Image (cartoon, helix red, strand yellow):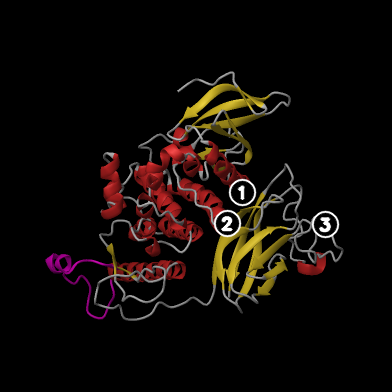
Amino acid sequence: MADRVGQRLGNYRLIRLLGRGGFAEVYLGQHVRLNMQAAIKVLHTQLADEDVENFHREAETIAALTHQHIVRLLDFDVKDGVPFLIMDYAPNGSLRQLYPKGTPLPLSTIVSYTSQIAAALQYAHEKKIIHRDVKPENMLLGRNHEVLLSDFGIAMMTQSSQYQATQATVGTIYYMAPEQIQGKPRLASDQYALGVVIYEWLSGDRPFHGSFPEIAAQHLTVPSPPLREKAPTISPNVEKVVMIALAKDPKQRFMSVQAFATTLEQASLSAQQAPAIFSGQSLQPSVEEITPTQSAWPSIATLSFSQTRQDNMSRPPIRSQVAKGSISRRTMVTVLVLVAIVVGASSFTWLLRSQQSPIQNNINTPTSGTTPSPAQSSTSKTLDVQANSDWQNSGVSVSKGTVVKIEYVSGNWRPWPGANFDGNGCLSCNPQSDPNNIYVPCHHGSLIGRIGTQVFCIGNGVTITATDTGTLDLRINDKVIYDDSGAITVRITLK
């Protein structure tokens, strides 16, 4: 491939090569008039005249994606049949460069990265856009070390008339969902790819190895090896969440990529609380299968922690060390441990049930009993509330009639710590029509919420009764773009 350093594409002169991949090579470009730099991605394809229009259409779709965790597309064009894209420059490289292959990451770091990536994917999915090539190489680090997802739809853009034979397998085979290998990608395909990335981050290894055909065949037919075989210290609940995202059937994965990220975060919290209880225990999780239903999405049955019959029978009898009618300290500790295990397992099971619908299986033995629904639940969410960041999905599903309370925890945006989020509710509303307001009844720059068609002002600790059903979305009440951004953490409680 020719080295393009020194060439001019659009208003940028290519000053050095940043990287080269299967679909394109990326250069650092310097604007010929302005003191600004950008990343110039030159695609490895030669477009025929009839393909140029399609490229423009795809590029316009990507350019419309404006999200704090998506690399912004500034411009695009075709020169001498070669298409190129001009994008924001992420100066801190990619997560692949930061963590080379074979490097396991701490769970807390994985949860943070997953939250940011899932937010970007969820935003794109709501616009019916599939990424098709989710992998660490396409996860860049911005100026503040925030994660930026790049290359939306790039795999599809490379498909000119001379590449139609490989149309069915665009993407990277290590992370490719079974249905994408078969040429039928869907939104859930990105969730599968993200699941493979998280599998790799947790264990330091990808689930499948071999040649292209061998890996493709394994994605299609072979279950991913259990995570705990490669990393025994991983929580069983964390493993279960990842394995759901790696289901062969897309209908058996989580309802959305945001639901996947939210459940992983909850599982990680349970993993942080579990060591003091489970340390030294030989208990292993088992999943009780449930009968099929007509629901379109998967659900996980109750997680029960039990030892095998053989293990119990092989254990030698314990002689009584205390007088009849008394309770030993060891007995009391055992009882408390078992109670803690049952409570923790039941709580995590309820979370999984709320995010999924029943798994279709061939097990004929139904599970008896029901999973209790808690009277109240709460979760914390960190939101980038930069103006014009668009509605941000909190991952919390709300039913009509549910009472919702949102409380300020920490953080700030622009110059105001918790601005207009001080418990005053609508006392700080501004009835005047401000052209920059998203929701006129609320004060300019305050926090607003949305559930389905219901939009409302948010005051710290003020309760709102949902008049519609949907996911709780949050954003700042401002259309104007500001250079200074911020982030706040809020606690969302449902009653």
Is residue 39 something that shows in the picture?
A: yes
Residue at far right of view:
432
Q: Quadrant of residue 323?
A: bottom left
Q: Which mark is residue 163?
A: none
Q: Are marks 1 and 2 in contact (CB under 8 Å)?
A: yes
Question: For this rendering, which residue is in front, 254 or 484?
Answer: 254
Asked which secondary structure carries label 1, the reply is: loop
Residue at far top of view:
6
Q: Amino acid at mark 3?
A: Pro
Disc nearest the viewer among 3 and 2: 2
Identify which residue is drawn at 47% across, 42% down: 155
Label 1: which residue?
A: 65
Nearer the N terminus, badge 1 or badge 3? 1
Asked which secondary structure carries label 3, the reply is: loop
Looking at the image, residue 434 sits to the left or right of residue 311; the answer is: right
Q: Which mark is residue 435?
A: 3
Q: Which residues are magenta?
A: 305-328
User: Label 2 neighbourhood size at 10 Å, few (<14), some (14-19), many (20+)?
Assistant: few
Rendering coords of residue 127 (x, y %): 58, 56
